[in-house]
């Protein structure tokens, strides 16, 4: 997928202009600070909608899995690896919002996410086991889009987060793009609904997670 034309973004009206921020700028104060910078947004959001085609959503990551993700980020951006452990703990701490009342979390992943190996077997087994507990959280709805979906209404998309109906955050390799234009938010919520219609839940989702865990060497 091609990256946004930054010149075009800069010409849009100020009240609807997407915010295009390079990761190199966001991580300059460290990965731990980056994790903590999202806490205010999490605190003011009641409905979280997250779609990921690549990774387990941060809200459901174990510390070990998060450390593997963030160490990869550290390597890409040439940051000290020591930062990844602190950042992983900060991510887990931030994720405790899923236990707070007054919020709902609709999380969607592709089945392939369960098969993407990060870390060793124990790390992946712990992460997959943690996903099995998602159904026990009353505010969390975890859907998995099977690889064998016969007719997709949406192909796998870039990872995106929808916060209530006020903000969409899209993650690219080089940057994060934030949209506040109502028409763009509406398009992402429509895409999310179409992706959600292909997902399985409950026992069917658990079966896919168990299958992935059992396939670990």
Image (cartoon, rainbow, N blue to C red):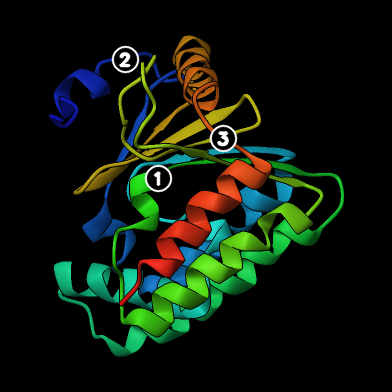
Between residue 46 and residue 132, name the one nearer to us: 132
The image shows residue 136, relative to residue 28, as above or below, that is: above
Residue 95 % position (x, y): 63, 63
Residue 144 % position (x, y): 50, 41
Which disc, if any, is residue 111? 1
Which disc, if any, is residue 209? none
Label 1 vs 3, first from the N-terminus: 1
Is 39 displayed left or right of 15 in the figure? right
Q: Quadrant of residue 176?
A: top left
Q: Which residue is the extreme one toward the top?
A: 183
Q: Mark yes or no: residue 29 visible.
A: no
Between residue 54 and residue 183, name the one nearer to us: 54
Q: Residue at x 57, y 45 (%)?
A: 205
Task: Determine whether label 2 and label 1 are within 8 Å by CB.
Answer: no
Spatial CA distance of label 3 from label 2 is: 39 Å
Residue bearing the label numbered 2? 12
Between residue 158 and residue 35, name the one nearer to us: 158
Q: Quadrant of the N terminus?
A: top left
Between residue 188 and residue 133, name the one nearer to us: 133
Q: Residues within 10 Å of mark 3 (few under 14, many from 20)?
A: some
Spatial CA distance of label 1 from label 3 is: 10 Å
Q: Quadrant of the C terminus?
A: bottom left
The image shows residue 43, relative to residue 11, as above or below, that is: below
> SS at mark 3?
loop
* Residue mark closest to the camera, 3 vs 2: 3
Q: Quadrant of residue 36?
A: bottom right
Q: Mark yes or no: residue 194 visible.
A: yes
Residue bearing the label numbered 3? 200
Task: Determine whether label 3 and label 2 are within 8 Å by CB.
Answer: no
Residue 164 % position (x, y): 66, 31
Q: Residue at x 44, y 15 (%)?
A: 184
């Amino acid at each position: 997928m091609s990256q946004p034309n930054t010149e075009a973004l800069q010409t849009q009206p100020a009240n609807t202009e997407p915010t295009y921020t390079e990761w190199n700028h966001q991580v300059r104060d460290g990965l731990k600070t980056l994790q903590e910078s999202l806490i205010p947004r999490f605190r003011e959001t009641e409905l979280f909608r997250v779609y990921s085609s690549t990774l387990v959503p941060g809200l459901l990551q174990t510390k070990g899995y998060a450390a593997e993700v963030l160490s990869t980020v550290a390597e890409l951006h040439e940051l000290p690896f020591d930062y990844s452990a602190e950042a992983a703990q900060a991510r887990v701490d931030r994720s405790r919002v899923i236990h707070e009342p007054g919020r709902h979390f609709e999380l969607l992943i592709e089945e392939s996410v369960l098969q993407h190996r990060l870390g060793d077997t124990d790390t992946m087994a712990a992460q997959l086991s943690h996903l099995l507990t998602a159904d026990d959280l009353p505010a969390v709805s975890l859907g998995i889009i099977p690889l064998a979906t016969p007719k997709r209404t949406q192909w796998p998309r870039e990872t995106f987060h929808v916060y209530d109906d006020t903000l969409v955050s899209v993650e690219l390799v080089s940057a994060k793009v934030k949209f506040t234009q109502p028409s763009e938010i509406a398009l992402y919520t429509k895409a999310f609904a179409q992706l959600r219609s292909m997902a399985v839940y409950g026992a069917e989702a658990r079966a896919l997670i168990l299958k992935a865990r059992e396939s670990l060497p």
